[in-house]
Image (tube, rainbow, N blue to C red):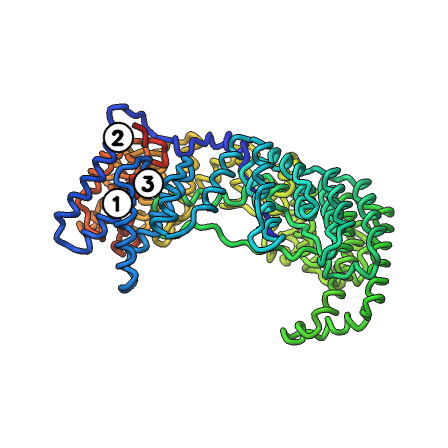
Amino acid sequence: MKIRVWIKSALAAALAVHCFASVGQAQSPVDRTTLARAVELVDAQLDKAQRETNADLKRRMQVEAYLALLSLPSTHRQYEAADRLRAIDEALAEKTPSSDREVIEVGLAAARTLAEERDDLQRIFLLDRQYSGLSSGESVNKQYFLQLMRANDAEAMSWFFQSMQPGVGEVAGIVNRSVAIDWMCQRGHRSLARQVATRLTAPELDAAMGLRLADLGASAEAEQRAAGSMTQTTRRAPAGPEILARLAVMASRRGDSAEVERLVRKVVEAVEPRQLSPDRRVSVDYGDCDWTLDGGFARRWQARSVYWQSAFKLTAQPGGTPLGQPYLVALADSVAGATAGPASVELIEQLIAIFDKSARENGIDLTNAAILAADAQTDLARRNNAPALAWYGARQSLILARMAAGAPIEDAAAKALGVDWAVSFLAIYPRSPLARRLAGLAGADRETLDRINPKLRAQLQLIALVLEGNAVDARALMEAEPAAVDLDAGPILHIIEAQQNAGLAERAAAALDAYLHVFPGKDLPALRLLLLQGRVDKAKAMLRDFVAGSAGAFGVSDIFVGVMLLRELGDRSDVATLVGLRPGADTQEASRRLVEVADALAWDGAAGEIEAATRPLPRELAQLPAKDAACLRDTLQGLQAVALARRGELEAGLRLIEGRSLDQRQFCWVGKGYDSKPIFDIRFLVQEWTRRGHAVP
């Protein structure tokens, strides 16, 4: 199951986040570099490049300077920079792979992002057309969309949406509008998204906007769209049942069992049994508009690292569209997710009866499907029997929903039950009473599970005890039943996140305490939850464990994140203390620890602290051979230069990296040498300086 998360103001407050405005030391206005001076410094690099005799170094210096010019909010030589950069790139394309092309690619992406952040349409157009040869229509539309979003102008945004024209057919326009609604939700503009979706009343948009309105809590409007789509004549099946099923999922997450029952009966009345086949599906996953926590936190924290930027392309991972669940399964799960008891069991049994009737009307023999499911062991067999297996799988899911609603755990349910299903169900429906039931398993239910799968029973009970905040019994279970120890504990945090997202703050806090008691140690998602819950002292304790861990193998590990967040939480431990938190480390380990600490200090603009750490080096590194010491100081001085640029002192930072060879533009590691993408150069320093808001006249 895909879980998406969004950092809210609670996390910002807990971290005292100062993001790009953060600096670790007091600044003197005299030391800050002005925009005019920055332009002069870039021009000076171009002059030096003209005099450089090494062809490779000359080309690199030009590439860096042109990228710096295109990153500044200045029109100085911008067309020349774009023309020359394109000519260099085209010439390199005819040769063997070159690191210069990678510098161009990464640098242009950063320059474009900076232009988007300051609404510089002229620069966006230049980068799209003069360098890439692309039409800027899409870019201008996107930028206008972002402007309207920031202005929170519902009327103008609605007009913008209504003016969208499909690219190839009707579906293209619908998809574009749906994506734009998701973008608003991703950026925290849910109220605006709801207003806009409500105003988009064109019949062809009923399906797309109905689902978004359901996620945004506009139940009445979504139900109106469902009714409207039922009357439409299209080649596709009406989306009304899908919208109603999605509304049932959302009502279940709120714990509104009466609303769930009403919606279930409305779907059953509106759709003939024959049409309720397993291929008619609805998403039960969390979308951008109904998940309020942030799942990209780890990537953003890593992106603050200079080394991470020099080693990896920071692009978002492509996400697939979830398959969803058959309508009847989603409805049955919604019933079980909201409440448990005889009435819920009876309603799900009615849905099972409708499912069986649908199978008969569609010519499906469920008994034969069960036999095929037992025999389909190969990929070929599963493909050949896919339709029957889909019906069998849906029937098994309905049996599990009946059990989750309070029916006895019979053999059929026990055989279908698994950890993956339980974790997914409890995360989708965080108010479900299933966890409480599993935590106190006894009598016939326990006997059935012990007879069929005792390991599964122990693992389910452990998960449930943690979710119920019962740390003592959960720990005792682990000690008494070794089978429970084999559990992958990570998915439990997904459920706790779902509790937090649903507003069940006390339950989420109790569950997290139990989780950390049973599964102690460093845990990035658990750390984020502690910060969301405002439990700073516990977060600090875990962060110190992060810093005391081992350094990464020439890369960012827990140490960077630990030091970076500790400083944002007000901990100003000195470098020697941070490096020494892991006693007995060898010189390579100690040197990598020092680099990660300095990387975190560079994010905070703490140039003075980085400089102090190199004069002299910490005692663990005092006996380094001269070559290794010089290698380490190259990296530390590069990080100091970045820190200076981030605090506004671009010129001082550039002085520190002046005259570096191509190798010295990389990170240098004790025992390995220079090994990373180029990063300590004028391009990167200018972009970091601009990103922090220092590029002002």
Report the quarter where the C terminus lies. top left
How many residues crowd mark 2 within 10 Å: few (<14), some (14–19), many (20+)?
Answer: many
Dot in front, 1 or 3: 1
State the separation of the CA atoms marked 2 and 1.
24 Å
Image position, residue 106 (x, y; %): 35, 50
Q: Label 1, on which residue?
A: 80
Residue occupying the point 37% across, 52% down: 132
Identify which residue, 51 or 539, lies in the foreground: 51
Image position, residue 465 (x, y; %): 68, 46
Image position, residue 36 (x, y; %): 25, 31
Asked whether residue 667 appears in the rendered view, the answer is: no
How many residues crowd mark 3 within 10 Å: few (<14), some (14–19), many (20+)?
Answer: many
Q: Label 3, on which residue?
A: 71
Residue occupying the point 45% across, 32% down: 17
Nearer-N-terminus badge (1/3):
3
The local secondary structure at tag 2 comes to loop
Figure check: 488 above or below 18: below
Q: Amino acid at mark 3?
A: Ser
State the separation of the CA atoms marked 1 and 3.
14 Å
- Is 175 on the left or on the right of 619, as rendered? right
- Is 235 on the left or on the right of 306, as rendered? right
Asked whether residue 543 appears in the rendered view, the answer is: yes
- Is 462 on the left or on the right of 400, as rendered? left
Kindly identify which numbered label has been placed on residue 23.
none
Residue occupying the point 85% across, 55% down: 349
Nearer-N-terminus badge (2/3):
2
The local secondary structure at tag 1 comes to helix
Dot in front, 2 or 3: 3
Q: Label 2, on which residue?
A: 33
Image position, residue 610 (x, y; %): 28, 37
